[in-house]
Image (spheres, rainbow, N blue to C red):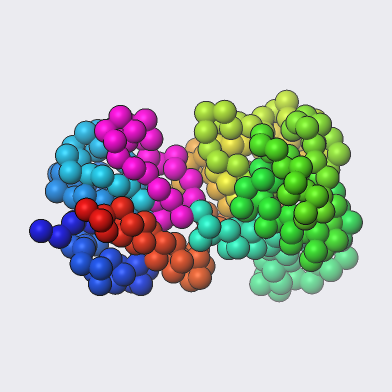
Amino acid sequence: MPYKVLICDPLQQEGISTLRNAGFEVDYEPAITREGLLEKIGGYHAVIVRGRTRIDKDIIDKAGSLKLIVRAGVGLDNIDLEAAKTRGIRVESTPEALTQSVAELTIGLILAVLRRIPYSDHSMKKGEWIKKQLIGRELKGKAVGVVGAGGRIGLQVSKILIHGFQAQVIGYDIIDITGKAEEIGFKTAASLEELLPHVDIVTLHVPYLPSTHHLIDREKIEKMRDGAILINTSRGRIVDGEALLEALKKGKIAGAGLDVFHDEPPREEWEKELISHPATVCTCHIGAQTEEAQRIAAVLAAESVIREFKNK
């Protein structure tokens, strides 16, 4: 009897074909509901998810045959890791697939905020010509604080900033990044508190964990330079969004580039106000939404499943 794999979110066909060619029985249900998953999960040996599907304790308790959960992407905050560990279910992800795509979007958001690109585009579409009002700032020579500089995305962002824009990067991470900093050519800070007052731009590249919830809160925002810019392409709840909105209104923060939000899609009025603020540039969690990244993530997810079961 072939091993059964359930794919719960959209996945590139190349990944599905890889599994089927390897002899797996694959059910592709990219819009499956929680109720449908609870009903069906018991018959599968592996599941592949992206960010939409939540694999919580109730679902894991119903998964009597489940041996592997694969997150096609980065971040495991939609999977109950403790429940999976208790049941002896392996959890894997494909963070390497998304590095370049997220790093490129990060740079794009920085430039969009510095040069007010979306605002200029919007005004042109309205038939306006407000050139004299759109004085921006260059990225070259700016001090950029990369929070999570030791991870794949943080390192790639640092490389692009240093070698592509001659920016001055200061990195911070909870792990030792001294060697990587020397290799790539950036300075390091011993703490977030040390980093924030010394940079013009702060960009976040950390996983969402209890320890990183509201990592950037009112107190941290107050430590930032007046007129600094905040970029978040990691997870929305790493930033206290209400505090950020308040800082934008006061002019403490000059602008923000946000690809991630507290709720996705946003529901709270304060978050809708944050998105509509003229100093923010917002995208709908598209960091990994490139053809290249999704193709690689799909194949890597399929290969994770094959590795798990090939000798069983």
| Residue at screen point 38% across, 35% down | 81
| Residue at screen point 81% across, 59% down | 162
Q: Looking at the figure, which quarter contains the N terminus?
A: bottom left
- Per the rendered image, the range of residues in magenta is 71-94
Residue 217, image quadrant: top right
Q: Nearer the viewer, residue 24 or 255?
A: 24
| Residue at screen point 74% across, 62% down | 160
- Magenta span includes 92: yes
Residue 5, x across and y down, in percent: 23, 56
Residue 171, x across and y down, in percent: 76, 44
Is 226 rendered above or below residue 118? above
Query: Which residue extends farthest top?
Result: 219
| Residue at screen point 22% across, 44% down | 66
Q: Is residue 194 left or right of residue 56?
A: right
Residue 245, x across and y down, in percent: 67, 38
Q: Is residue 201 visible?
A: no
- Magenta span includes 165: no
Q: Is residue 119 left or right of residue 274?
A: right
Query: Which residue extends farthest front?
Result: 311
Q: Is residue 30 left or right of residue 301?
A: left
Is 202 rendered above or below residue 113? above
Q: Nearer the viewer, residue 64 or 120?
A: 64
Is 67 rendered above or below residue 56? below
Q: Is residue 194 visible?
A: yes
Residue 76, x across and y down, in percent: 44, 43
In this rendering, the count of numbered labels is 0
